[in-house]
Image (cartoon, rainbow, N blue to C red):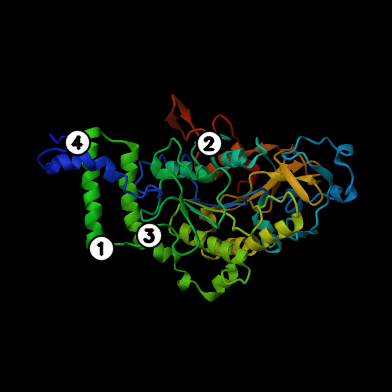
Amino acid sequence: MHHCNRFRPVPLSRREMLAACAGGFGAVALTALSATATPQAQGTHHPSPVRNVIFLYMDGGVSQVDSFDHKPMLERFHGRDPHTVFTVEPTQFNNVGRVMMSPWRFRQYGQCGRSISDLFPNIARHADDLAVVHSMTSRFSEHTSANYFLHTGSGLQGRPSMGAWLGYGLGSENRNLPGFIVINGGLIPPGGLDNFNSGFLPAAYQGSVFRPGDPPVANIRPLERSADEQRGKLDLLRQLDRAGQERFGRSDEIDSAIANAETAFRMQAAVPELMDLSGESNATRELYGVNSTYNGTRIFGTECLLARRLVERGVRFVELTCPNLGHDRWDQHGNLRRGHEDNARAVDQPIAALLRDLKARGLWEQTLVVWTGEFGRTPFAQGADGRDHNPFGFSLWLAGGGVKGGVSYGATDEFGYKAVDGVREIHDLHATMLHILGVDHTRQTFRFGGRDMRLTDVHGEVIREVLA
């Protein structure tokens, strides 16, 4: 025995070395990458042709009364003290200004005659494809809790994201790519990466964060001199991990580390091909705005084009975040006009292109597209020219497979302030999304903490009026 009581006088045997080092080498696996070699998926509960979700997250909260919820009464009462017009609830910043009409004109589009503001002239051309829910509510008026609620069904940190739940329920269709990918345009939502976490589900279902640039994810380029050398390292890691399993038993962390390392190895071949847009025609790049002179459109256009390429390759759940345009996301507490116009300019053309391209490539019926923020905004000003957070009633839309286009569901009051007809909350959105993909939200459960957990907790009703 060495004098400091830490070293043995003889070398370790191979078996002893493998057993002692297994846990440490297992940590070498790329744990930020979600594995596709996952535990057995639960499967669907009813037939559905829809296999993928593209979640267009409008971080910060788009104003419903400036986008998809036209309220002429705001014009009539513009400039009035809102306390004399309706009951004003406590606001996030308690800086209540005057009733404020929308700075943008609303026009009617499509056979359905839907009113959409001039913020979204390109999306408006797809009015007959959209099922708009006007009566969504949130339980939270602060970004972090509202984001957790939107992404995980709970306002508290640590629950599994909806993308993780879909992977757990349906598994993956591509062993070379993660089943849940977030393309980060520059703004991770308040609440951080826990919005994309696997929570108490197996770690293999967590979201993998890519960016629409080069490199898209860390360590994607091999450092080894040859594929054989890289394969040899991976084989050694597998031996070490298996030795640890034999000695200490199986664990989710080690199993996921092994699967993550295998996935990362395959991704080093799959991801460069995925991200290479040179095979896309110039017409397609122009359609999405990838060649735009406006940086916001260029970034989000690349995100949308990558989202289409990901669902083509069988990735189950793709979330897109907003580009960083120098504003606080869609969170315009001041200077509403400039902030919303800049954000809309970034996303309007790419989203319209995505809808058109999904149809052209035969992906429409198998892809659900969801557009929403975490809450809406007040019909009265914050200060002089902003709008505060409003969880009491806001708009979102769904399109694609399983969705009845051209319908409107629910309503807010005549000022667009509070949902008054068909009132819904985020649990209902999650139940509807799962249903469209063939999953009964009441039956997709995971045993944790002594009870069966689910994305919708003990809540949620499918919004059947938007179903095809």
In contact (CB < 8 Å): disc 3 and disc 2? no
User: CA separation, marks 4 and 2?
Assistant: 41 Å
> SS for tag 3?
loop
- Disc 2 marks which residue? 157
- Mark 3 vs mark 2, CA separation in Å: 29 Å
Residue topped by disc 1: 227
Label 2 amino acid?
Gln
Marks 4/2 in contact by CB < 8 Å: the verdict is no
Residue at image location 27% in from the left, 40% down from the top: 23
Q: Amino acid at mark 4?
A: Arg
Residue 119 found in image quarter? bottom right
Q: Quickly name the residue at label 4.
A: 6
**Residue 341 placed where, x, y %?**
71, 60
Observer-side mark, 4 or 2, equals 4
Q: Earlier in the sequence, mark 3 or mark 1?
A: 3
Q: Earlier in the sequence, mark 3 or mark 2?
A: 2
Mark 3: give few (<14), some (14-19) or many (20+) Cα within 10 Å. some
